[in-house]
Image (cartoon, helix red, strand yellow):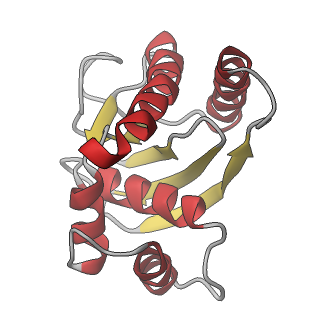
Amino acid sequence: MRSTQPGRGWTRVENHARVVGIDPGTRIAGYAVVDFDSRGSATIVDAGIFRLDADATLSARLRQLYEDVTALLSEHSPTHMALEAVFSHVDHARTAIQMAHGRGVVLLAAELRGIPVAELPPAEVKRALTGKGNASKAQMQRAVMSQCGLAEIPEPPDVADAIGIALCGGRRLRGVA
């Protein structure tokens, strides 16, 4: 149960939270749905990727991403969303711009449903799960596997990133973590 109105920021949770974590992209976007109880225990409900048509125009891929995220939100009815914040480096400016387009679509989908969103810097998520803000994809995959008690490494790495984002976001909730 949320103590503030939807869409008004990250909120206090009294009994249960369902956090959807999104690792946005315009070709592949990772997602994870994680339930948190009042003690902060996490259970993965669903995780995977949205594989967007690489041959389609950017606008068509953004529409596909919006439709996929909308369907995910409808299916799982999350109470919160955690989303990777834009990371920008001079050598990867084009990637940051592309990611920003995907983030905008995901933010719109959450806003239209009144879902509060926490935007998490990649280094914060990596540090929370591995202890290192510059952890590699493989280190993130192993950390998620270990912390979630998974039998196999989550593949592709976008899935592990989305699970990590959801876990980190859920741990921020007051009253749950």
Q: Position of residue 149 (x, y in %)?
A: 53, 85
- Horizontal side of residue 66 vs 131, given as left or right: right
Q: In the image shown, does 98 or 72 lie closer to the viewer?
A: 98
Query: Can residue 171 be seen in the rendering of this structure?
Result: yes
- Horizontal side of residue 1 vs 172, given as left or right: right
Instruction: Indicate whether 167 appears above or below 70.
Output: below
Instruction: Indicate whether 22 appears above or below 142.
Output: above
What residue appears at the point 56 percent right and 53 percent down from the top-left corner? 32
What residue appears at the point 33 percent right and 17 percent down from the top-left corner? 7
Q: In the image shown, does 98 or 63 lie closer to the viewer?
A: 98
What residue appears at the point 31 percent right and 63 percent down from the top-left corner? 40
What residue appears at the point 46 percent right and 34 percent down from the top-left corner? 99
Q: In the image shown, does 81 or 79 lie closer to the viewer?
A: 81
The quadrant of the picture occupied by the C terminus is: bottom left
Q: Position of residue 167 (x, y in %)?
A: 38, 60
Q: In the image shown, does 71 or 133 lie closer to the viewer?
A: 133
Looking at the image, which residue sits at the far front? 91
Query: Can residue 13 be seen in the rendering of this structure?
Result: no
Image quadrant assignment for residue 132: bottom left
Q: Position of residue 128 (x, y in %)?
A: 24, 68
